[in-house]
Image (tube, coloured by chain):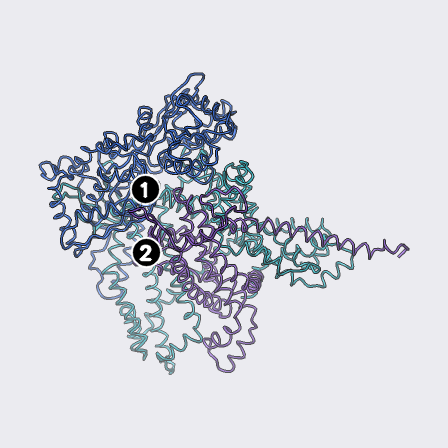
Amino acid sequence: MDYLDYVQMTKGQQISYNIKSFFTGIPGAIAGFFQVVANVIKGFFGWIGNGFKGYGQRFSDGDTGTKLSYVIMGAGNMMHKQLGKGLVFLAVEVLYIMYMVNFGMTYVSKIYSDNVTITDSNGVTAVHYGVIGSNTPVYGYDDFGEKTLLNRDNLDTSNNVLLFFVVTLLITIAFFALYIANTKSAYETEQLIKAGKTPMTGIEEIKDYFDERFHVTLLTIPVLGLLAFTVVPIIFTVFIAFTNYTRERIAPGELYWWVGFQNFAEVFNTGSAEQSATFGKILSWTLIWAFFATFSNFILGIILALMINKKEIKFKAFWRTLFIITAAVPQFVTLLLMKMLLGQGTGLNAMMGTTYPFLTDATWAKCTVIIVNIWVGVPFTMLSTSGILMNIPEDLYESARIDGANAVQQFTKITFPYIFFVLTPYLISSFVGNINNFNVIYFLTGGGPESHLYYKSGETDLLVTWLYKLTVSEGDYKLAAVIGIFVFLICAIGSLIAFNMSKASKNEEEFS
Amino acid sequence: MVSKTKRVLALVLTAMISASALAGCGGGSSGGGSTTTSTPTNSTANNTASNSGNQAAELDLDSDSSVDIIKERIKKEAETSGGEIKLEVWCSGDDKKFETTRIKAFKDKYTPDGVKIVVNISAVGEDKVGGKVLEKPEEAADVFNFADDQLTGLAESKAIADLGDMFQNNIKKNNTEESVSVCSVNDVFYAFPRTSDNGYFMYYDKRDLDEADLDDMDTIISKLGAKNKNIYLPLGNAWYNCGFFFAAGCDISYDAKTKQQTATFNTPEGYKAARAMNHLALNLHKGFECDAGSLGDNVFVADGFKNGTLGAAVIGTWAGPDIKKNIGAEYVGAAKLPKVDMDGEKVQLHSFSGYKIVGVNKFTKYPITSKVLAYFLTNKESQLERYKTRGLIPTNKEALEDSDVKADPALKAIQDQKEFSHPQGASVGTSFWSCSPGTIGTKIKDAEGNLPEDKIEEILNSVVAQIESSNKSNAT
Amino acid sequence: MNTTNFQNSPQAGYAAKRKAANTAIYIILAVLGVIWLFPIIWLILTSFDGETGAVTRSLIPTNWSFNNYIKLFVQYETDANGNEVQVAADAMQFPYMQWILNTLFVAVCSCVISTLLVLMVSYTFSRLRFKSRKTFLNMGLILGMFPGFMSMVAVYAIMKVLGLTNSLIGLIIVYSAGAGLGYQVAKGFFDTIPHALDEAAKIDGATRHQIFWQIILPLSKPIIVYTALTTFMGPWGDYIFVSYFMDQNPYGWTVARGLYEMIDNKENINEWFKPFCAGAVIIAIPITTLFLIMQRFYVGGMTGGAVKG
């Protein structure tokens, strides 16, 4: 259906259309979601499958060079007039083997150590299986009779073992990709020579990386950065969710071990019986918060932008600047300021001599954070919607005016639906952003007020602030990792479904 | 699960090894597979038996003869790092000046020839040190000052060094018995006691209250209320409202062996304590104030005394200097906590008592230098110096006999309060403060003293359930 | 037009109504403006309050002074003889000047690196077509959905292995290594540049490398400015990472960490709350100026990205 058709419907029709299209869209969206997941998985395995496709075939078809490249990387290229490329492949193989022998294998073998004797805080020793790392502390006594650590520099830290294991895993995957590429390249050059053509020289190949394969050149550094500082940490953290890593096992030599899915059960059984529902409570508040935070900002931001951009209103730049100033002061400053302003015994309360529990009563605090978030966020929405408002085709309004629509009708029938259509992806990403909106909650209430019904969290804690508290102040890393995985799942499922329902993603489909 | 993971892993490993074999050069030198060597651990956690007969144990660290022995030992430690010893000390920001002068004195006394000792001091609040050390034990300071309730956590995470006979003997000889008792967990000795200030009592303005008024909370409230002033007692803060429960006969305890935290607040005595809080809160803002707001209690209290909203406050020595500065030392009085009304009966209010102690990082490169420094920073001279700069009450027996210290009203108040105080280090486990025993007080405050009995029971039952399961996650 | 009374003609009524509506809008805008600016004004007024102590009872200070600003740069202590002496430049509890320099360094470096990374990624996804493009895009989408600091502990472990903890270089890496994920807005912008330009250049024999540097980038000034400014402003506002990655030595902190520490501890807050306000005002001035300058780009960048998704 065209956008213009939509605008011409009456309000009642529009609502029923919206509701109808929402529900009829759900199955498609869910299907779309699974399609995306399936595509990613398919893409990954397809990529692996492609690598192996013809692996055996090429071996039996190939000449000596190609066959040799199955054992000595680069041999094929070297024998097919591509000395430089062959040497690079060979170097990769040598480096990989050196890495594995000198370094990688140690950590791969330590990732699951059996029969490790671990002393707990009571001095009781026990033998454990599936421990990450194996060198535990050894103590002796010095000439003063002081107990000393004898193997201070030779202790395993489970963190390091796990980290190097993940790195080794990725390096190995990369190595195999290059290995397959090497056999392919050997075979392809062989075919080229057989067909009477000359394979690219080293110089040509390098040039190709600035033209046909320029995407490889451009993406290498960003992808390496992401792999090292985003992907490796995420895999690491996902692994942590399957261990018993807590603050008690943080010191070097105090190893942690694999515990399976235990922590996933623990998330739903935290603390006392009443607290065991903490995850559910925090999740529902997170969603309520994200809903109100997103839509309050969106609607108020549009109204503000409309007022400022109204034709007859003068000093537009002045009004805009007025609101932007609050957005420009670094957020933690404005939020800490708000905390002072709304605190007990400070700011407003001190000036007026009152004791309003803006941040100390659960219901008050929940409303306060949403209102303060409006204060923080509306200028941004105002800014971003201003541009769109200016782009609304003027003839839409002309025709509406001819039909005798008043200002309110123009807003509800033209402006709002138009912006809503255009900004759906923005709305979705700001909804996800609000689920992860750490700053407003952490700096304003710190998750408080505290409650005996919440496990190591407070009434306004979001999943992410809970995660942060568990990590930084409680040192319950395993539980934090599980919560992180859940937050990811919620965001991923929610936004993929929403993206599939929105028009823009269909455009992208057509575009590519 | 275990065997399954193992099988998957074995599969991955086999794949890798066979792949590397396929790739040519024999990469099998590492021996492959999941065989591991387990290092035998020296399981003697008790360090008493193994070093008997050690002459160093008799060394008196305050004697002049010990200086050369220590110097020699420090020199030996410095040799491992080319003659330079670099230490990091964490103390509260207010202590920085004091620590700087004392560390200079330490260097003058103990630096051996040819050795350079460099000490860097960073400000970390004494209530935050435990958490900071446990965030990254290896990178934490070599010597750190902290409040004794964090010791259990530091010990359980094995981030703090234990002390041998020599240091133990010196500490035990010089410090009060109770201060020594908070320095060990599970019979292992860890820390150097420094001050006994980490408890609370009552400061008051002598112009508002006479000594005769101090015994009874109701008298204080009515007298201050008549002057439009308040007594401050933070009901919503667990550290303070536990005093009501203790007074009523409840208790909390922590078993370091089983890591079980217990509390008996949900008993008839506990309900009685909550009713007593209810009774007080009826006077909210009319003689009684219980919320310091978001600025911190010392700010609130000092400010309250200054502008005449407070005439008395239940707080500790850390607020002393500011109160004295604001209204003049001559008007500041200190006393033990008053009696409160519990079901018509006047009961002495109890309190927590706590100590500030000094610990040494287990992963320090220079254990002996660090321990000697920690000892030096907590010896008699240091404690007296700290009393002079910050007004904090020493734990050293001789320092307590000092005339200035003896004349301090806060000391008298602490000592009067002593028999009604509960040492927090021994009774509080790692997770107690992240529970919310303060809730009951907050709810009473919100209800302005009209919290119904069934609600009291409900909350207390729930809080106790929370406290008793607070260590579940760590008890694996 | 059946009415004869001119004053009550629809036009006149319409004009009056419009005037009333505009007046109402002015009033609403003014009221909202006051609400929005009130905390900022409070911040500025408090920063000039000459009274020490964290409690302010009146909006307008009774005692105006620059002391809070001076205290950020010059701090005094009493020495052994009871004299007020200036604290040495390397022994201050809160070395504000050093924080500004640190933050500036980190912000400039991570701004340059991030902008390059973002441009590389967004250009690739917008203009180049290759086999695994869709997979990469999906992967990017998925990675972006993990909560930012979920893997903070792991990143710290990596930094420790690399020996980059407690170093500004480490911070720069933390702020910019993942920048490639933020390609959406810039990609939206590149999508709007006509493909005909590339085609024409290709016919003239230009390589993709040349097209990128010589044709597309010169046209991309708005998005470059937008990306650079947003990434430049990041380190000024981040507290989480800098608090986890830097140790207790105040000389290694950035402004955000330092200001937070000023009022985080109850033993500091009484003395440092007002200097905190002054410090916040000082950094707010350049950031606000930058923000006002880039407003124009901001509007373009954000909507460009939003429209295209």
Residue at mark 2? C90
Q: Nearer the viewer, residue B81 or A116?
A: B81
Check disc 2 and give the amino acid type.
Answer: Asp
Crowding at label 2, few (<14), some or many (≥20) Cα neighbours within 10 Å? Answer: few
Question: Which is in the foreground here, disc 1 or disc 2?
Answer: 2
Q: Secondary structure at mark 2?
A: loop
**Badges 1 and 2, same chain:** no
Chain letter corresponding to the colour blue: B
- The quarter in which the N terminus of chain B is drawn is top left
Q: How far apart in space, not on screen, are marks 1 and 2 (Cα)?
A: 27 Å
Front in this rendered view, residue C272 or B16 = C272
The answer to whether A417 is drawn above or below residue B287 in the figure is below
**Could you say which chain is coloured purple in the image?**
C
Question: Image check: B358 left or right of A293?
Answer: left
Residue C276 place in picture, x, y as percent:
44, 50
Q: Residue, x 32% and y 25% (percent of image)?
A: B416
In front of the other: A159 or C202: A159
Name the amino acid, label 1: Gly
Per the rendering, the mark at residue A321 is: none
Asked whether residue B476 is in view, the answer is no
Q: Which residue bears the numbered disc 1? A: B130
Residue C27 lies left or right of residue B48; in this view the side is right
- Output the chain of dot 1: B
Q: Which image quadrant for residue C158?
A: bottom left
Quadrant in the rendering for residue B397: top left
SS at mark 1 in the image: helix
Which chain letter matches label 2?
A: C
**Relative image position of residue B71 (x, y in whole percent):** 13, 48
Quarter containing the C terminus of chain B: top left
Q: Which chain is cyan?
A: A
The number of numbered discs placed on residues in the rendered structure image is 2
Residue A450: image location, x then y, percent: 45, 37
